[in-house]
Image: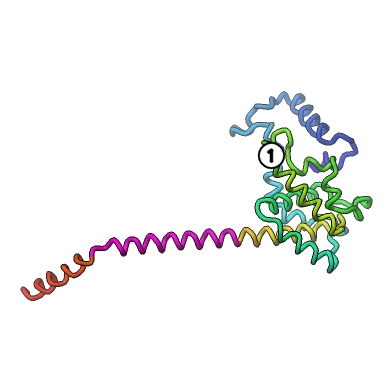
Amino acid sequence: MNYIESSDVEDKDNFGESLLITYMKLLKISNEESILGYDFKIKNIISLYEAIEQRVEDIEVKNIYFRYQDELSEQQNIQIGRLILEIQLPLIEEMMHIIGKLCIRQLRNLQKELLNQKIFIYLLEDKNEPLYGDEKQDSMKQKEDKDKVKNKFIDLQSTQVEIRQAKCIYDRFRQHYQKLLDDERAQKAKIDRDKQEQINAEKIVGININDFFDSGPKQVRRRGNR
């Protein structure tokens, strides 16, 4: 994937697909052939790569070229903070992963022409469409979600954040995403506790108080008979 991203060919999407098909033909591998005995097909390779990429994303972003790790200005921090607060789950997660993909796939090595480009404008260029996923397999809802993500990137263009600040902007998105995730988990835990308390209360209400008092004299008589 990184080889394809760093290549000089114009049509990288078709180039990547053509490259894979060429190797498959040379090795006489079919698109539907299973790998290592599992029900996993060659056609799923990109999805597998992206799943692994996402799992190690926060670690790999730390390893991008140091020239893309500049800090945000005080004004940018304020603007970003205000605008990010308006973005909720799941959009914030999707936007974070798109910025993460950009960092991992394109910013490992220095490309001087990218340094001063505005990141939220650059992300909307046609050549970066693969960062948003495979459009051919998108459902109607996924396409609508993509449009929402792109509109949010447009809103963020006023911050004038540049690609040289890519790691810092990724970190800001990740922090907000983690906070929303923690809040969601805390809310779910509270709902679960409230439900359990309600169940316990219903059990107490269901106890017949006469059964409790009836058991008392019987115990006394047993002790008296001894």
Q: Position of residue 216 (x, y in %)?
A: 16, 71
- Residue 107 percent location from the top left of the image: 84, 51
Task: Name which residue lies at 68% across and 40% down.
Answer: 142
Q: Count residues near mark 1 (Cα–Cα under 10 Å), then give few for <14, some for 14-19, many for 20+.
A: few
Q: Amino acid at mark 1?
A: Ser
The N terminus lies in which quarter of the figure?
Answer: top right
Q: For residue 141, which quarter of the picture?
A: top right
Residue 41 is left or right of residue 222, and the answer is: right
- Where residue 181 appears, x then y in whole percent? 62, 58
Q: Quadrant of residue 186?
A: bottom right
Viewer-closest of 93 and 67: 93
| Pick the front one: 34 or 10 | 10
Task: Identify the coloring.
Answer: rainbow
Residue at (86, 55) in percent of width and height: 163
Residue for point 81% across, 32% down: 14
- Residue 196 on the magenta segment: yes
Helix, strand or loop for disc 1: helix
In the picture provided, is 75 more to the left or to the right than 191? right
Q: Is residue 46 above or below residue 115?
A: above
Whole-percent x and y of residue 81? 76, 64
Which residue occupies 65% across, 27% down? Answer: 33
Q: Main secondary structure of the magenta part?
A: helix
Q: Quadrant of residue 168?
A: bottom right
* Vertical side of 132 occupied by 194: above or below: below
Screen quadrant of the C terminus: bottom left
What residue span does the magenta drawing correspond to? 183-208
Of all residues, the one furthest to the right in this rendering is: 113
Left or right for 34, reference 65: left
Q: Give the labeled residue for mark 1.
A: 47
As drawn, the residue found furthest toward the left would be: 225
Residue 197 magenta-highlighted: yes
